[in-house]
Image (cartoon, grey):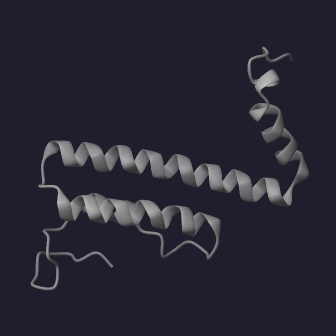
Amino acid sequence: MIPSAHTPESPVPVEPMLEWFAYDHLPEGPLRDTSSHFHALAHNLTLELPRSPERTVALRKLLESKDAAVRCAVHEARAAKDPIVGKERDRVDSPDLAAAPAHD
């Protein structure tokens, strides 16, 4: 849990953006595992860097990266359950097909 105020138990002032890196609500598995890495990095950045506009930018971009990585993990989890999704992934990841124009 993220502290709500600077206290002796919290070595740094609160960074409001840290709430978006929480992962305790996610079920055990790839989504939680993926998200946990970003949680740790966000907290480390908050501990190591002074509060500044640039730190906020760094956290915001890290949040964007986390969201993309979690979406990738969601896609992989769906592909494991649904072979059609897996075939779509293979089609897009194929170097030959990725450069080809889409046909309707």
Q: Residue at x 21, y 48 (%)?
A: 55
Q: Can you give x and y, in whole percent of width and height, for residue 19 in the image?
A: 34, 65
Q: Residue at x 50, y 63 (%)?
A: 35
Q: Can you give x and y, in whole percent of width and height, for residue 32 in the image?
A: 56, 69
**In front: 91, or 95?**
95
Q: Can you give x and y, in whole percent of width and height, for residue 40 in the image?
A: 37, 66
Q: Residue at x 17, y 55 (%)?
A: 49
Q: Is residue 61 left or right of residue 93?
A: left
Q: Residue at x 40, y 50 (%)?
A: 63
Q: Can you give x and y, in whole percent of width and height, for residue 51 in the image?
A: 12, 54
**In front: 95, or 52?**
95
User: Compared to 13, does 65 lie above or below?
Assistant: above
Q: Is residue 37 left or right of residue 86?
A: left
The quadrant of the rendering that contains the N terminus is: bottom left
Q: Please say whether residue 15 is visible from this viewpoint.
A: no
User: Compared to 40, does 91 lie above or below?
Assistant: above
